[in-house]
Amino acid sequence: LNGGDVATFQRRPSPSPEERQPLRVVTHHWGAHWMKGFDVYEHLDQLLQQNSWRGKIEFTHVGNVPPGFRYSTTRHVPPLSGPELAAELSSHHVYLTGSVNEPAGMHHVEGALCGLPIIYRSSGALPEYCDGFGIEFAGPDDLPAALERMMAEYDRWRAALEKYPHTAERMCREYIELFERLVSERDEIVARRRLWREPWTVLRNQVPV
């Protein structure tokens, strides 16, 4: 699993309840494809125009947007990287990702390493990375309930991030262990692959005796 650089993306002290009014929510994407979650981000932008939500939530999107896409209430920041990105993320309270079919991703990892509980879509690999570190939602329609729940349970999810495991150090260590295992088991792996070069043998092995 992917991991981020803890020397760059660092936790700040947990904000007090007073400091979380309004709750500052952030996301960031370099890509501008609609499947990055723009149906969710557009819905949140519209939600924040309603009197019932005004003053409770502030939303920031760092990165690119689809051609012709415009926010009304959302703060839009051009793409950032490195310490500048980490500083921007850390100035918020919650990370939101609405990506569809995300195969892995780094955006939610970087947000979590900055100490931000995650509101994440139940799609792709997001649950695999984010389960236990935030609140899951299915799509735009149930985003409001996820936001309400996060406001009520913030301290719980903030504390859970103290055990967040997805660091670059762990990722690199596991890659090295994988490569070493592949090298040590090379002959066995090659022997298994040669079987597929003998289709009749494969076929015989699949027929019940």
Image: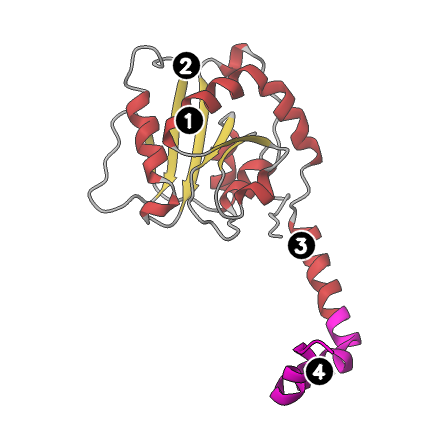
- CA gap between label 4 and label 3 equals 26 Å
Q: Amino acid at mark 3?
A: Met
Residue 7: horizontal and vertical position, in percent? 63, 44
Give, as a single range, the part of the protein colored magenta: 181-209
Circle 2 residue: 56
Q: Is residue 187 left or right of residue 197?
A: right
User: Where residue 190 is drawn, which disc sits there?
Assistant: 4
Residue at x-position 40% and y-position 34%:
139
- CA gap between label 1 and label 2 equals 17 Å
Q: Are marks 1 and 3 in contact (CB under 8 Å)?
A: no
Q: Mark 4 packing: few (<14 Cα in 10 Å), some, or many (20+)? A: few
User: Where residue 171 is drawn, which disc sits there?
Assistant: 3
Q: Amino acid at mark 4?
A: Val
Residue 36: horizontal and vertical position, in percent? 38, 45
Above or below — where is 103 with respect to 63?
below
User: Where residue 188 is drawn, which disc sits there?
Assistant: none
Circle 1 residue: 142
Above or below — where is 117 with respect to 56?
below
Q: Mark 2 packing: few (<14 Cα in 10 Å), some, or many (20+)? A: some
Nearer to me, 14 or 189: 189
- CA gap between label 4 and label 2 equals 59 Å
- CA gap between label 3 and label 2 equals 37 Å
- CA gap between label 1 and label 3 equals 33 Å
Above or below — where is 53 with respect to 190?
above
Residue 74 can be seen, yes or no: no
Q: Say whether disc 3 or disc 2 marks the residue closer to the N-terminus.
A: 2
Q: Amino acid at mark 2?
A: Lys
Q: Secondary structure at mark 1?
A: helix
Q: Secondary structure at mark 4?
A: helix
Residue 73: horizontal and vertical position, in percent? 29, 24
In reply to whether residue 208 is colored magenta, the answer given is yes
